[in-house]
Image (tube, rainbow, N blue to C red):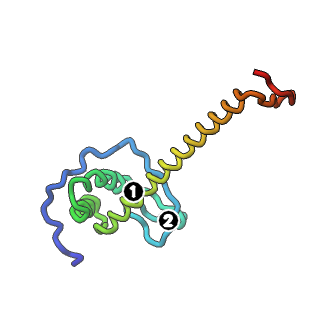
Amino acid sequence: MANRELGKWKLPQPLDLHDETEWLPIPRIARTVPFGYELDSADDSMLLPIKQELDLLHKAKSLVKQYSYREVALWLTKNSGRHISHVGLMKRLKNEKRRKNKAFSLRRWADYAQKAIQKAEQIEESRTGARNESSGETATT
């Protein structure tokens, strides 16, 4: 099973990869090393990015919209030289999407909270009988 043919490909070749993207090292939090990273020889708790694999993985995100996870995983394996299963690819992309959605939601909630604080301050300043905090007197409007 490990030596099976990768077959012929209809998928596009990785010609339009992003050259300006800078990938950063990440901390190691699991036993397995994720696709696109390698263990740092100087520090076992850090993972160093492999630019080619991460660029291919970035391209694969758009390919899964058009092709199956199995086809894209085999394409990644063929072009990167490192094996990734279709289940591993699916988990990786779903986890990234979930983290991105969570970060987006938290940013949106922070914006809503900031707007609510500003609105509350405007209401407190404009209401009749509001207390002037600098002199301790009531304001008359």
Say left or right for 64 vs 139: left
Task: From the viewer's side, name the closer residue of 46 and 60.
Answer: 60
Q: Secondary structure at mark 1?
A: loop
Question: Could you say which quadrant of the image residue 73 lies in?
Answer: bottom left
Task: Identify the mark nearer the N-term, 2 or 1.
Answer: 2
Which residue: 54% across, 46% down?
109
Residue 130: image x %, image y %? 77, 30
Q: Quadrant of the N terminus?
A: bottom left
Q: In the image, is residue 91 above or below residue 25?
A: below
Q: Residues within 10 Å of mark 2 (few under 14, many from 20)?
A: few
Residue 54: image x %, image y %? 36, 54
Say left or right for 10 vs 61: left
Q: In the image, is residue 123 above or below residue 69?
A: above
Give me the C-alpha separation between circle 2 and circle 1.
14 Å
Q: Mark 2 is on which residue type?
A: Ser
Q: Report the residue marked by disc 1.
A: 50
Q: Are marks 2 and 1 in contact (CB under 8 Å)?
A: no
Q: In the image, is residue 57 above or below residue 126?
A: below
Task: From the viewer's side, name the closer residue of 67 and 1.
Answer: 67
Q: Which numbered marker is on residue 14? A: none
Residue 111: image x %, image y %? 55, 41
Say left or right for 76 vs 43: left
Q: Report the residue marked by disc 2.
A: 41
Q: Quadrant of the C terminus?
A: top right
